[in-house]
Image (spheres, grey):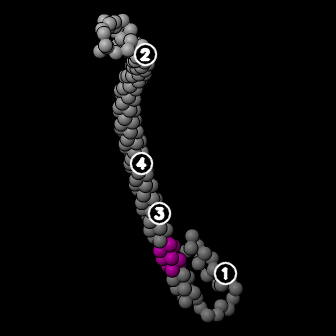
């Protein structure tokens, strides 16, 4: 590649009937200036390209870091979800166990209360049977007593002529009752 320095240092031999030296020098000066400008632009472009390449590399590193961060966050999300699901299952299992335990305790207490009630009912039924028996015995003895009194009354004469005979009968009846 020809540089502006090459153009500046280039010397032509003089020949008769050749080109005008001033036009050649002027053209070479223009060419040198344009080559200098192109070299400066190329240097600037290369500098910009280098800056952009550095930025691209930096962005690529950032992209890799972002990808890693996203993967880490996704893993953490899955772990958190799995932990939350495990905790939820444990809470549900604990709650179910507690509910089963409470239900078992309630059933046991109910069975105890039912047995106690059955025992009280049986006791009360026995008391009722005893009370009925006592009532029946009392009724029978009362009927027997009335029967005895009725028999005594029916054996009594209708009329007593004296009061002594009436008193004797009353004493006799009283002594039989004892």
On the image, numbered disc 4 is attached to which residue?
99
Secondary element type, mark 3? helix
How far across and how far down the image is residue 68, in percent?
36, 28
Residues at marks 4 and 1, CA–CA distance in whole angstroms: 85 Å
**Frontmost residue, 166 versus 59:** 59
Lower sequence index among marks 3 and 4: 4
- Looking at marks 2 and 1 on the same chain, the residue that comes earlier in the sequence is marked by 2
Kindly check if marks 4 and 2 are in contact, taking CB atoms under 8 A apart as contact.
no
Q: Secondary structure at mark 1?
A: helix
Looking at the picture, does residue 8 appear above or below residue 68? above
Q: Residue 25: percent from the left, percent from the top? A: 40, 13
Q: Residue at x 38, y 8 (%)?
A: 8
Marks 3/4: CA–CA distance: 36 Å
Report the Cα–Cα distance between label 1 and label 3: 49 Å
Closest to the camera, between mark 4 and mark 1, is 4
Residue wearing tag 3:
124
- Between marks 2 and 1 in the image, the one whose residue lies nearer the viewer: 2
Is residue 46 shown above or below 104? above
Residue 26's tag is 2
> Which SS does the magenta portion mostly show?
helix
Image label count: 4
């Amino acid at each position: 590649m020809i540089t502006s320095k090459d153009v500046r240092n280039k010397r032509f031999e003089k020949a008769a009937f050749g080109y005008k030296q001033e036009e050649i020098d002027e053209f070479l000066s223009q060419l040198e200036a344009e080559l200098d400008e192109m070299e400066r632009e190329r240097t600037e472009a290369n500098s910009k390209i280098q800056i952009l390449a550095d930025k691209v590399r930096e962005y690529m590193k950032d992209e890799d870091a972002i990808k890693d961060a996203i993967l880490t966050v996704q893993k953490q999300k899955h772990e958190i979800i799995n932990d939350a699901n495990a905790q939820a299952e444990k809470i549900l299992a604990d709650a179910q166990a507690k509910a089963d335990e409470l239900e078992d305790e309630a059933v046991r207490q109910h069975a105890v209360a039912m047995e106690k009630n059955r025992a009280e009912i049986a006791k009360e039924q026995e008391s009722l049977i005893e009370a009925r028996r006592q009532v029946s015995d009392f009724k029978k003895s009362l009927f027997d007593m009335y029967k005895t009194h009725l028999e005594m009354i029916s054996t009594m004469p209708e009329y007593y002529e004296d009061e002594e005979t009436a008193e004797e009968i009353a004493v006799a009846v009283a002594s039989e009752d004892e």
